[in-house]
Amino acid sequence: MDFLRSLFSRTLGLSAGEKVLDELSLDGVARYIQSGKCKNIICMVGAGISTSAGIPDFRSPGTGLYSNLQKYNLPYPEAIFQIDYFKKHPEPFFALARELYPGQFKPTVCHYFIRMLKDKGLLKRCYSQNIDTLERVAGLEGEDLIEAHGTFHTSHCVSFLCRKEYTMEWMKDKIFADDTPKCETCNSLVKPDIVFFGENLPTRFFNSMKKDFPQCDLLIIMGTSLQVQPFASLVSRVPTSCPRLLINMEKSGQSDFSMGFLGFGGGMDFDSDKAYRDVAHLSTCDDGCLALAELLGWKAELEELVKHEHALIDSKDAKKKGVQTSQSSAASDKDVKNAETEKTK
């Protein structure tokens, strides 16, 4: 049995590695970042990083998305993201999309902390389960970001024979007009490029993870229950010496029984005597990022970045509303003039 454990551990990269952190705590992680040895940070993020923006997560009892879908009369909550159900009954998904549509929310402190990692040359990549595009709004660009579960940024016709692409603005106009999006070429449904149950993850996700994770020297996991595969398995793809920091309201991603039975450490190990690289900081994602930023001496810079970027968003929104108001007034004035002209005839 010891021989088999050793063989599989070496093969799968699950044997214990070098201890890099001087302490299994947020302080230890901060000192490691400050040491200059940490240059390829990967962030794995889920719905929990967006809850303070007003977007519900999926699984929190009472407040999570799945707990509040009764009004859509679904056979079961997950059906709203089932591709087969969507093709027959698209209305519930588009009604929900109208509530959660990107452009109505601002990035959080956590989003801007990831942006700071990028600006400081420390971010290898951010792998996100989210479809709200807030990482993009916060300043992460194409090469910085892997949207593992897709995005609202583009949409496609669901017909395999067509697959015509549509823009985010086109989809937004349809959704907010309460008009079920149909392809202009073949009249099939058009769906945002988010990954439904029953669909494959983007090819870029698989290609990038093979290159990125072997180079990772710090993995920061935030706001995810690590219950959905294959995303959850990414925590085991970093080198065995790579520290892993979880910032979440509760511990997640811990080793399951089958791996533990063979003596493997594929999942997270926060509490056992053999723990040597995993740190759990239990808090909201924003509070955790602020705490880490303070230890790094970045807190004031982070707070100023959030303030500045939110002000820019507010300014753009105000200009957009001003243009819309002007257009509405102009249209109204035109209607009045037309009515007066008709009266004089």
Image (tube, grey):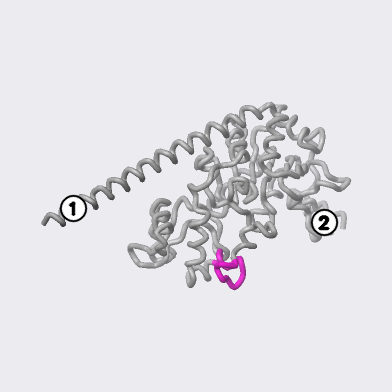
Is 71 covered by the magenta stretch? yes
Is 216 covered by the magenta stretch? no
Q: Helix, strand or loop at disc 1?
A: helix
Q: 299 left or right of 93?
A: right
Callout 2 amino acid: Gly
Measured from the top left, where is residue 103 in percent x and y?
Answer: 48, 47
Structural crowding at the residue carrying mark 1, measured as other residues with C-alpha within 10 Å and reported as few (<14), some (14–19) or many (≥20): few
Q: Residue furthest front?
A: 344
Image quarter hosting the N terminus: bottom right
Callout 1 amino acid: Glu
Please tell me how many numbered marks the rendered image carries: 2
Q: Please identify the dominant SS of the magenta region.
A: helix
Q: Which residue is mark 2?
A: 260
Image quarter hosting the C terminus: bottom left
| Up/down of 257 relative to 245, above or below | below
Whether residue 229 can be seen here: no
Measured from the top left, where is residue 113 in percent x and y?
Answer: 62, 36
Q: Which residue is mark 1?
A: 340
Measured from the top left, where is residue 215 in percent x and y?
Answer: 65, 40
Q: Which residues are magenta?
A: 70-82
Q: CA distance from mark 1 to mark 2?
A: 81 Å
Identify which residue, 273 or 184, lies in the foreground.
184
Q: Residue furthest left?
A: 345
